Amino acid sequence: MNYKLEIRDSFGNVHERKNQYILDSIKSGDGHVDKKSHPYTKKLNEFKRSEKTFLNSLKSVDAHIKDGDSNIIKELKKRLYKASLKKDFYSKYLDLTYSAVLRYEIAEAELDQIPAIINHYDELNEKLIESEERLKNLDPNELKKVEQEIEEKRKEQIKKFHQKTDEINRKYKEGLISKKAQKTEGKIAIREHKEKLNEIELLNESKSLKETIENLKHRKKIDIKSMDNVLESYISNIRRKTPVETEQKKPFLSYVTAVLPGLGQLLNGQKMKAFLFFLGSLFIYLIAIPYALGFGNYQGDGIAGLITLAEGGRRLDRSIMFMIEGIIAIILMVLAIGIFVMSFKDVYKVEKDKIKGIRPRNWFETKEIIGTDGFPYLVSSPGYILTIFIVLIPIITAILISFTNLDPNHQSKFTWIGIENYKILFLGRGVAGKAFWLILFWTLVWTLGATTLAIALGFILALLANQERIKGKPIFRTIYLLPWAVPAFITIMFFSLMVGRQGPITELFKNVFNITLDVKSNPTLTRISLILLQGWLGSSYIFLLSTGVLQGIPKDLYESADIDGATGLQKTWRITIPLVLFQTAPLLISQYTFNFNNFSIIYLFNGGGPFNPSKYGNLAGSSDILISYIYKLTMESNYQALGAAISILISLVLMFFAYIGFKNTKAFKES
């Protein structure tokens, strides 16, 4: 990589080089110019020696500070005096290096703006001293008289306010003004009353002075800080438009310091950023790497424990702990690698920019960027960390368990068995595999039947309740919302008791129709009952959604359709249904995914029964869906690995169909 004749600042402006050694190297073509003997190098080294001596001398300068000056003023006066000395010193080297130009222009900015900050502070301080002195000299007897006058005026104002409100109420009762005018005039009267009371309170000079003193103290802090920020912004602007020259041709520093985040930032002169990355280094070398190697684990052995799963370990060692701690170790190492990459990219970019001529950002500029561009990431980072430990680790654990032999015979220690659990399910091996396909088929039938019925029923009820010719709409809407208002488990348990062997519905059919309904012992009747029950329970939510959309459809559309001679069915099919689906399609799709995993109704209604051991063995019943089957496999029969495998398959299928469904909706495309 060769030197370029020109350099650029942060704004992209082109500047000529001042480094004569680099210019001569470019002109020579082969770059063989002796750096040590070059006149420019000698001048630059002389400048650096003089600058070092000069900066050391500034440490002991006397800025003519008064004894009564506050710490803020002392620092500002020191800074101002040093700025005048810096301006004189660097003015001699403006043609030599851009470093001198930068420091010269910063000194000019400080000489221009710091006096205004000091004067403003002095003005506020004088006003504060004057107000405190006036407060101290107030006559107590005079204050008492004023307070008595204020109390009398307050009472008089309150009396006037009551007279005013009484007058407004009288006008309303006599029919002279409307209810709306009464409220409006009342509000005006209240506002005027409060303003008058505030004016009366200000007659108390003691309170007024105390408020002024508090305000001045606050302004002394805020105003000076604000003006200082303006100065720093101006200096930052000077830095961005003043380039930097470096004899470095390649960004090697980022590679050399990559193993220790923070070191590269320190060498680039970015101390605060270096401190933050050094914290990252502490995390890497004191937490992430030791934990990955097994140090600090509760039972596991870091990443190695994820491979061995406690095989050959102590009797008390549990494979699940080794697995979880191995997963945590990997996540910590991924975070560590992320810190390495971020640090490397940061140092590399700063080096590349310096070679181009762009000066590295100082801490003030970095804070500004963090507060704007980096704010979303800063705010979201706690959420990301919680997501890792609350969501990501359990998901990864479930995925990995599906590749093990965690079953009733291997609860404490289990091993990796690859895709054997998935083979059992797909090939229908054993009782678990055979039951899987039967349950999957019923789950699909249940999901489509119950959800479609709920959507259709809810939409039809919404259409009926929204008809202008229907009387008593509030009553109907209340009835339709009852399944949603009443807790679902109460409704499910109620209907479960109603259709039991001795239940009222069963007895009714037996006495009236001479039919014995044994719903909970008949697989077909149980399934039909579940679909009908969930259709009723889910209809309220769809009714609520559809009603909101129907009430928002402009009547002009229906009037235009009437003019065109459209029938009621055509209006429903061409106008109502498309608009309702457009607004509610994502929520309707979520109803299918909800019912696919609707555990409560299956478990509460009949416990997944009736049971048929010849088809399902002892692991499930005829009305079990996949989610309840997983519960029985894992919680009741301890087949956690098979349950995890089914859970992963369910998640993949649901994500796929949900994505396809959402992708094809207009609401998703236009969002």
Image (cartoon, helix red, strand yellow):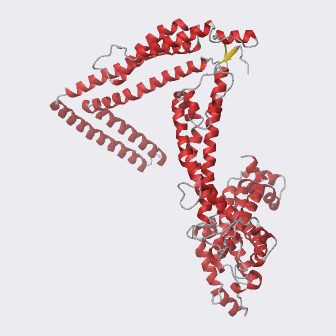
One can see residue 392 in this view: no
**Closest to the observer, 386 or 580:** 386
In which quarter of the view is residue 346 placed?
top right
Residue 515 point in image, percent of width and height: 73, 91
Image side of residue 255 versus residue 418, left or right = left
- Give the quarter of the image for residue 283: top right
Please count the marks in the image: 0
171 or 568, which lies in front?
568
Q: What residue is shown at x 60% (from left), y 60% (from top)?
A: 324
Residue 339 drawn at (x, y percent): 60, 41
Quarter holding residue 9: top right
On screen, residue 223 versus residue 554, left or right, reads left
Examine the rendered structure and indicate whether residue 48 appears above or below residue 508: above
The answer to whether residue 396 shows anywhere in this view is yes
**Which is more toward the observer, 441 or 123?**
441
Coordinates of residue 85 in the picture (x, y in percent): 44, 10
Q: Residue at x 74, y 60 (%)?
A: 652
Query: Which residue is most to the left?
Result: 141
Q: Is residue 664 left or right of residue 134?
A: right
Q: Position of residue 599 (x, y in %)?
A: 65, 71
In the picture as drawn, the residue positioned furthest to the right comes out as 565
Q: Residue at x 45, y 48 (%)?
A: 175
Image quarter where the N terminus lies is top right
The foreground one among 594 and 413 is 413
**Left/right of residue 97 with respect to residue 624 in the rendered view:** left
Q: Is residue 306 above or below residue 112?
A: below
